[in-house]
Image: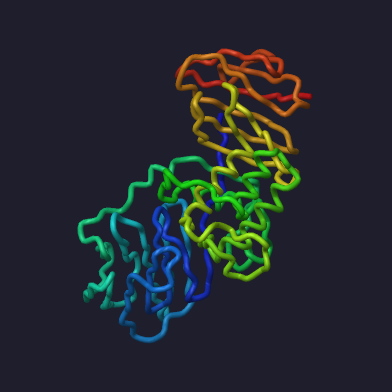
Amino acid sequence: MQIAIAERLKGFVHRPGVRALIPGSSLVAEAYPARLEFYDLGESTPCGEVALTLEGAGEHFTLEQDLERGHLKIFSSFGRKLFRVSLSACEGGVLLLVDKLPYPMAFQSRWRGVEANGALAIGEPVRFGAPLGEPLNFSTLLGERLSFGSSKALNWDCVSGREEMREILPYWFRLGGMAPSLPSAKIPSSTLLSSLDAAIAERRRSDLIPSLRNLYRAGFGELMVPSCVDEHHLGFSLPPLSKESSPLLLLSAGAQLIRSILIDERDGALSLLPLLPHDLPCGRLIRAATSFGELDMEWSCGRMRRCFLNPTLSTELLLDLPKEIRHFRVRYLPHGSGRKVDAGTPFPVFQGRRVFIDRFEK
């Protein structure tokens, strides 16, 4: 018995020249069939360039940001032959790995002023800026996952047009969880990010989706590339973030704020769906790290349906639930009747013994 998420977070575009963040880094790639440019996030001058020597023009171009494996993929075709490479973050630079190659292909590169030439070969990684660097080890690839039940393909031209938060928020949450940490960063005042933070702190449930949508529209480009300024000039009275802040804060702090409307801990209690917006009536959150252990949870029709906890300590657990919930069922085995527990009443959990909680009833 488990709660799983089937959707795969792979945003893509079919147009050359689109920028995308390399997951786990502050580097942005701008991809074309015959050229790659790399930028430090927030900068307009490239820090690296790779020019490919092609025999003819590429067709059917696709740039894909794969958040399942933590890299970018570039697809193109030359006649009936395919060209496919992946770009991953590594310490100090970027790693390029060729998966499909239509013919021997040379390249010329420049990385932070250092020029190099070479040839691409299938299965042989090329490192730019970090000759000894290894791909980053994303322990977060097995980390927290979020779904609001959308199964649409993440063609970002369509995603941007729809602006549906149930599509965008899981992607934002995932990409933010993979972003480099900013341990000393704080949310600056008088920004759209601080407005969202205030709406959550003041428990203004009806303002959450509008605040999230405004922050998304002003603070992100295609494929969720964050920016401190409203590059679309939409006319918001506040900027997404202060110019002194790292744009990565929109991803990492945004992901934490999204999480806080679904699960929170305060006064020794575990709060489930404390501020669930009416626009997000169903969903799943899995592998959520809490001080009590790892939690999987599922809700539908705006109400908790079930959750499973893998306790890391033996203690009394108190669930803080929406006020309309009167009681729920607790089981220590996947099958069996279990016992009914009144809302507001703690119950025991035991280290290493999975707890099954369901039948949240009014």
Q: How many marks?
A: 0
Residue 325, percent from left and from top: 75, 25
Residue 127, percent from left and from top: 26, 63
Say whether residue 179 is left or right of residue 242: left
Q: Quadrant of the C terminus?
A: top right
Determine whether 334 is above or below 103 in the image.
above
* Residue farthest along the bottom direction in this orientation: 56
Determine whether 226 is above or below 304 in the image.
below
Residue 187, percent from left and from top: 54, 48
Determine whether 125 is above or below 46 in the image.
above
Q: Quadrant of the N terminus?
A: top right
Q: Which of 221 and 333 is in front in this view?
A: 221
What residue lies at 74% left-to-right and 38% top-to-bottom? 302
What residue lies at 31% left-to-right and 82% top-to-bottom? 53
Q: Which of 145 and 215 is in front in this view?
A: 215
What residue lies at 58% left-to-right and 40% top-to-bottom? 259
